[in-house]
Amino acid sequence: MIASKNAHVQRALLLPTASLVLALLGVSESRAEDDYVIYSPLVTQGETEAELRGYQMWSGNKTLDHSGSFGLALAYSPTNWWKTELFTGPFDYSPTLQPVRHGSEWENIFQLADHGQFWADPGLLVSYVQSNQPGVPNAVELTPLLERSTPQYIERFNVVFQKLIGVNLIGRFNTRYSYMADYKWKEGFAPGIEAYDFPSDNTHQVGPGFSGEWALGSHYTLEYSGAFLYGIYQGNVGSALVLRVSTVF
């Protein structure tokens, strides 16, 4: 695993330190496009992953009803503590518009400690968001990651701190939150819940989720997850069906 004890300590300290600095700078509210994804901090050296993920909305708001988004990600883990990923999209669509590509995103996950070293496994996601839409700035994101797992269940919690490039550079950060908990009911299927909070439009969504994986021969694994989310308060965006499918090899 990670080479030295000092490296363990440094990486373990990085997560709370980064979170504290961002909190002191302050957070504001913004809605991102690739919203419905919850990252694991764990990295497996030499692993390659291709993932398709997306969602569709149902809402009383006519501009959002039956709209959605999807994108494709390709990831590789060159070390046992670093995973790098390129996400192309999201492609947004609606009943009246053809899919529109918003740009791309370069994501890097850093595992900050050995698996099981602490009560929860810590990690940090560092992302650069490239926009191809007129008037929409690029952005950087820092996302503390936590995961807690036992033979019976798994939990993940992410907090995304986003800063638009060239817009109030010293100002406040945008933020959004995601959480999932799945019960390992049987091999290949784990039911649970997912929850998301988007302060920018006072949107809070929660609903039943699921995840699982199947071995495809000796070198490939099919992983899947999803959720059906409900808006908690009146005036939110409504319901969303979220699906993610990936092949790991």
Image (cartoon, helix red, strand yellow):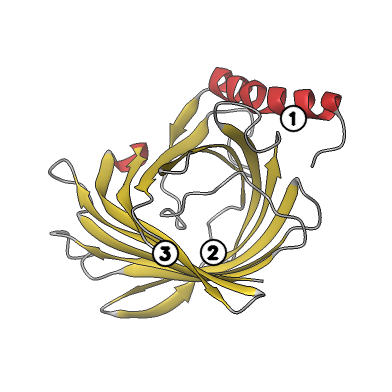
Crowd class of label 1 (few under 14; some 14 to 19; many from 20; radius 10 Å): many
Q: Amino acid at mark 3?
A: Gly
Question: In the rendered view, does 97 fall on the left or right side of 51?
Answer: left
Question: How far apart in space, not on screen, are marks 1 and 3 (Cα)?
Answer: 32 Å
Q: Quadrant of residue 1?
A: top right
What is the number of the mark on residue 188? Answer: 3
Question: How far apart in space, not on screen, are marks 3 and 2 (Cα)?
Answer: 43 Å
Closer to the N terminus: mark 1 or mark 2? 1
Q: At 60% from the left edge and 79% from the top edge, which residue is drawn?
A: 217
Q: At 38% from the left edge and 44% from the top edge, which residue is drawn?
A: 180
Q: Amino acid at mark 1?
A: Arg
Question: In the rendered view, does 61 fall on the left or right side of 51?
Answer: left
Closer to the N terminus: mark 3 or mark 2? 2
Question: In the rendered view, does 77 fall on the left or right side of 222?
Answer: right
Where is mark 2, residue-wise? 134
What is the number of the mark on residue 11? Answer: 1
Tell me where residue 242 appears, x and y as whole percent. Answer: 34, 62
Tell me where residue 116 appears, x and y as whole percent. Answer: 62, 34
Per the image, label 1 sits on a secondary structure element best described as helix
Per the image, label 2 sits on a secondary structure element best described as loop
Q: Quadrant of residue 81?
A: top right
Tell me where residue 56 appears, x and y as whole percent. Answer: 30, 67
Kindly check if marks 1 and 2 are in contact, taking CB atoms under 8 A apart as contact.
no
Q: Amino acid at mark 2?
A: Pro
Question: How far apart in space, not on screen, are marks 1 and 2 (Cα)?
Answer: 38 Å
